[in-house]
Amino acid sequence: MKQRFDVIVAGAGASGLMAGIQAARHGAAVLILEHMDRAGKKILATGNGKCNFTNEKQGIAYYRGKNPAFVLPALEQFGLEETLDFFRELGVRPVSRRDGYYYPASGQASSVLEVLLMECRRQKVSILYEVGIRSIGKENGSFCFDTKQGKFYSRTCVIATGGKAAKKTGSDGSGIPYVMGFGHKLTELAPALVQLQGKQSFFKTIAGIRAECCLTLYIEHEKAAKDWGELQLTDFGVSGIPAFQVSRYAAYGLLEGKNVRVSMNFLPGFSREQAKELIQKQFLVYGEGKTAEEAMIGLFPRKLNLVFLKESGIWPEKQAQSCRKKELEGLSYLIQHLESEITGTKGFDHGQVTAGGVDTDEICPDTMESKLVPGLFFAGEVMDIDGMCGGYNLQWAWSSGAAAGKGAADFAAMCTGMKHSDGLQQKKRGRT
Ligand SMILES: Cc1cc2nc3c(=O)[nH]c(=O)nc-3n(C[C@H](O)[C@H](O)[C@H](O)COP(=O)(O)OP(=O)(O)OC[C@H]3O[C@@H](n4cnc5c(N)ncnc54)[C@H](O)[C@@H]3O)c2cc1C
């Protein structure tokens, strides 16, 4: 196999494949080095195997990190429309489901991976698997990849090794030493889009319930984040989209040793007054001959009803109409403010993404090139950007991968141009 390339990409995940394709489309000879036995394992796991690959709503509000505005130039160059066109041209028909989430019409994440690999073959992008990169450094002006399969050289290097989340898919944090070897700083890493562990014993009773809920996260009693959707109650705490959306803030709060709590509102569309009225009607108007437990039937799943009654101190067998207004006020308050202390997250292995990464202050936002090492580029989750649930992490992989691939190809072409003009200069000098 040839040893010298214009662009070598470390990591054949979403961003690495996109970087490789775009670099090749801009004329570069590209090699992708992957340490797993296949490419894009994480892509296959996305969107429960259906791959929510972008979202019709885009903007800075959907991205997190020390400097979320860092995403804007890459999104301007290769945003939603470019992503949809890119996949349409490769044969994937995008369909938009709930809230603008885009999936391939096949309903299979494997289609997204397959078309990326087909395009790699078409663009003559080489991919080497189970490669085991020992180090990446500079030798005589070129990047040198010292691997178990020999040394490879390139004019430019794209690091697309992902973060530390879901390490069984390949992103195990082993790319981080390469980044640090080039002198780049990392912001603190934390699991994100991850389940939260709660202290309260009631979770054991209500495990398995899914309910519409507005979840508010408090750190040291200050509101830190809020999300509304289907909450999944588990025996350890909370899961589902609202829990995922607030989880990065919880993870950082816990890392800093702060008090982290969630407040669950199971009547999210109701004002305080409306909630009070609903419960009073349920007990005092419709509750004739019913126990408190019976008066709650039809409002929430039975086990959740029992938790609400227990936590607000109402005996389930008590006659509904004998409940005092104060008690019912307490019950309706609790339904809108069921609290739990958060003791931990389920960690990187269960997280969908990594918050934190290469400090974006040290990267050019339009090309993803390092401000410290010319010719070094980054793509995807390895950088300090994480997206909300809804296709934003893959969108970041596509956008940053496209910018890095084009940037790396342009850089390599510039080096070749310089070499040619060096040669011409030397020839000219030789003639005079
Ligand atoms: C269960 C799950 C569901 C998800 N669902 C969605 C979703 O529906 N929508 C969405 O937008 N996002 C989703 N995500 C997040 C999304 O998949 C990632 O943010 C995205 O894949 C990141 O792309 P990446 O290329 O930066 O990193 P990765 O996809 O992690 O790719 C990194 C690649 O680099 C390789 N690698 C790592 N270290 C080395 C090394 N030392 N040498 C060589 N190769 C290396 C890895 O094996 C891997 O192939 C989900 C994640 C998970 C885990």
Image (cartoon, helix red, strand yellow):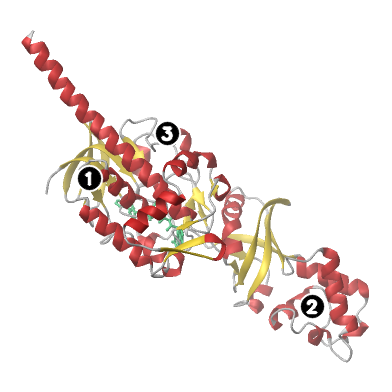
Kind of residue sitting beneath label 3: Cys
Mark 3 Cβ inside 8 Å of ligand 1: no
First of labels 3, 1 by sequence position: 1
Residue at the spot 30% in from the left edge and 60% down from the top edge: 115
Kind of residue sitting beneath label 1: Val
* Quarter of image, ligand 1: bottom left
> Please, what secondary structure does the residue beneath circle 2 have?
helix
Residue bearing mark 3: 364
Q: Nearer the viewer, mark 2 or mark 3?
A: 3
Tag 2 near tag 3, CB within 8 Å: no
Residue 61 lies, in percent from the top left, at 58, 47
- How far apart are labels 2 and 3 at the CA level? 56 Å
Nearer-the-camera pick, 176 or 225: 225
First of labels 2, 3 by sequence position: 2
Residue bearing mark 2: 309
Quarter of the figure that contains the C terminus: top left
Nearer-the-camera pick, 195 or 117: 117
Residue lying at the far bottom of the rendered structure:
289
Residue bearing mark 1: 30
Label of residue 216 in the image: none
Q: Is residue 215 left or right of residue 408?
A: right
Residue 188 lies, in percent from the top left, at 50, 45
Residue 308: in sight, yes or no? yes
Residue at the spot 30% in from the left edge and 54% down from the top edge: 12
Q: Residues within 10 Å of mark 1 (few under 14, many from 20)?
A: many
